[in-house]
Image (spheres, helix red, strand yellow):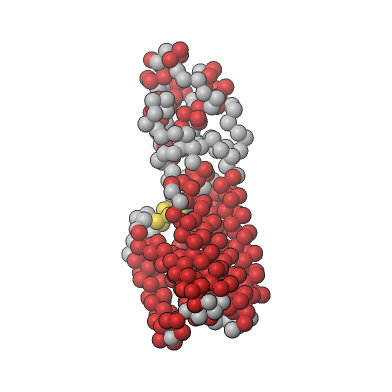
Amino acid sequence: LALLVSSAATVGAFTTPRTSFGPSIISAPVLQLQPIAQRTCVSTPLQLLKNDMTTAESKPLLKAVENPADIDNGKNDLIAPTIYALYTAALIYIIYQLRDAIVAPTLGSFALSFVTGALIWDNLIISIGSFFFKDIDTNPKKYQILKWLSYPRFTFHAVGVPLQCITVAEMGKFAGVGFLQSDIVQIGIMVAAVALAIADRVKFAKSPGIEQTIWDKPPFGALERDLVKFGYVEPDFAYVIPAIILALSNLLVGIAALKAGTDPEVAKWMIFAGLSALIGNALPGNINTFSGNLGEAGMQFGLLQAARIVFGWM
């Protein structure tokens, strides 16, 4: 008992005490029957949970916890939402710069601004949800508020991402990419982008919707466990297809523009945008929760630099 109480007291002041090390754990048969000399000494009980729960050291504590989602990761609760707050600030800077960069407005420049705004909302809601909605498990009103604030996250993102392919097409035309000089191709891309956006939302309307993301699987020391946000009830690969198409379009059109040689500067920024999105979303595991949004911010920054040239002089 003394070991558990003293080690629990070392948890940081800003960590969420999701797991209670009280009488329920003391009464667990595993801890009562195990001799003290055989227990593993750790600086905090949370260190037992940083690795996969199949390890021998973590099994006794896991048995004493009814819901693995309640296990705290032992990290400062402010770190994860602060990262998303920084993403939000960076995107606000980008959309502010777009206002001055776009001299000749087009459908593509509108799509670029719209997607940037959608990403601001996406990161902002994840950030404030993790700052101010920690208690939604026990507060139904806050749960509903955050849920309704989260619906636009998915809708704006899903609608805007395909439309930004129009931005890529206009930039490619400016940079001298051959097939994008055709008005028929440009119109075809517009129609396809709108159709893809509509199909995505029709699919979502037929789905069970969104629900709070529950972190009930290893690794239990992951930083993402401090995020309070919503996700699809039934995640589907089809939802990420538009983002993949957009990232690849940036990269491939950028390479084609570089070969065309009309405006290498635009081409390089398009390649940067495509690689940022692809690499950010390709990183594995719990890193992807943060790198994916960083990659999207990088993509918008690259397209901002291209937009200064394309929509500033068209």
Look at the image and tell me in which quarter the C terminus lies. bottom right
Given the current orientation, which residue lies at the most extreme bottom position?
183
The residue lying toward the viewer, choosing from 138 and 176, is: 176
In this rendering, does residue 271 appear at all? yes
**In the visual, does 175 lie left or right of 282?**
right
Residue 11: horizontal and vertical position, in percent? Answer: 58, 31
Residue drawn 55% across and 61% down? 298
Seen in the picture, residue 174 relative to 274 is either above or below; the reply is below
The residue lying toward the viewer, choosing from 302 and 243, is: 302
Residue 212: horizontal and vertical position, in percent? Answer: 44, 51
Residue 287: horizontal and vertical position, in percent? Answer: 48, 48
Residue drawn 41% across and 39% down? 218
**In the visual, does 62 lie left or right of 292?**
left
In this rendering, does residue 149 appear at all? no
How many numbered discs sit on the rendered protein?
Answer: 0
Seen in the picture, residue 141 relative to 26 is either above or below; the reply is below
Residue drawn 59% across and 70% down? 304
Residue 202: horizontal and vertical position, in percent? Answer: 35, 69
**In the visual, does 206 lie left or right of 130?**
left
The residue lying toward the viewer, choosing from 140 and 246, is: 246
Residue drawn 40% across and 22% down? 28
